[in-house]
Image: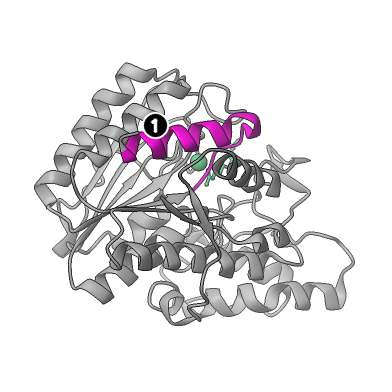
Amino acid sequence: MRCVESPKHRLHDPVHEVQFGVPIPAFEVPARADAIRSALEANGGFELEEPAEHGLGPIEAVHDPGLIRFLAEAWDEWRATNEAPELFPDSVLHPALIEGMGPPHEPRSPLARAGYWCFETMTPIVAGSYEAGRAAVDVALSAADLVLGGEPIAYGLCRPPGHHSPRAAFGGYCFFNNAAIASQHLIDRSGEPVAVLDLDYHHGNGTQQIFYRRSDVTYVSLHGHPDRAFPYFTGYEDERGAGAGEGSNLNLPLATGCDDATYLAALDRALEAIERADPSTIVVSLGMDTYRDDPICDFALTTPVYGEIGRRVAASGRPLLVLQEGGYHVPSLGENVVTWLRGAEGR
Ligand code: Q9C
Ligand code: ZN
């Protein structure tokens, strides 16, 4: 299996995240991708390659130009006036602040701009965040090109992840929405509809938002129910898409402690919905934070079930573009990803 990975992910090396108002060690760290890369190298049958640069065009096809500009400029602007090693917002643009008013002004200071474009306190911008985010997009697009070139399956080791970033914001450890950008790229190159199957523990609010009113991308997600799980405000079953996209969004929120059998039953429902949509490619947002030992999540999946999940997804017979999202138990990440991909390849 051909796999795409960039060493530039290490340029995004956050020290902290802020949870419950308290700075704690960051969970979304370079060791995650390094562990997956080592496991792919150590297990036969995976060919690693570096991505090709695709420029800003595919990002501009999905994201607000203001968001892209902010992410490109933020670090240098912050550095010009502040010695702090990480940029976190302290005030976020709550929609009620401007209820009934016209569009807000984008502030000038980097701190206030961070609160204009970011929706939480867990995704610091550090010196190399933008370059790493751009490289993750190139990883996703290069893996998409492999599928467009006829590979039945390709894996993109994206880091930082992407599925929490909507069109005009970032957060949830994500900068650019790698899976959404790759999905748009597949559509632009093939003219065919795609499905995104989001298997990260967290609801992919960003991907859902980007395609909510479109019928050419079916978004299907299994995730921790928003009554307890980040991103809290999306992921309910009644979010079914709107306008032309009515019926092309399916959320399957799951309870605390979700085990292998419960998960596989929900996966079968997800795969039935994808069969009905009949996409030419399935983009898998693959999060390994469904694993039972994940430090920030509460499902109970075991390593062998990832092989079965990969098998069931591949049984659709459709080309698969598998892109890495979350997963924070570093010691298990490599084995779980390898198990998933081997299952999908039927070996
Ligand atoms: N106390 C991904 O897995 N932390 N992002 C929530 C709340 C943020 C996860 C904890 C989780 C973001 C790609
Ligand atoms: Zn996640």
Residue 144 place in picture, x, y as percent: 37, 64
Q: Residue placed at 42% from the left, 62% from the top?
A: 143
Which three-letter amino acid code belongs to the residue tagged 1? His
Image-quadrant location for residue 329: top right
Q: Nearer the viewer, residue 113 or 186?
A: 186
Q: Is residue 180 magenta?
A: no
Q: Residue placed at 73% from the left, 67% from the top?
A: 111
Q: Is residue 191 above or below residue 332?
A: below
Q: Residue placed at 44% from the left, 67% from the top?
A: 142
Q: Nearer the viewer, residue 39 or 78?
A: 39
Q: Residue placed at 52% from the left, 68% from the top?
A: 51
Considering every residue shown, the one lying at the far front of the view is 44
Q: Nearer the viewer, residue 155 or 289?
A: 155
Say which residue label 1 marks. Answer: 225
Image-quadrant location for residue 114: bottom right
Residue span colored magenta: 325-345
Q: Is residue 38 above or below residue 258?
A: below
Residue 57 place in picture, x, y as percent: 44, 82
- Say what secondary structure mark 1 lies in: loop
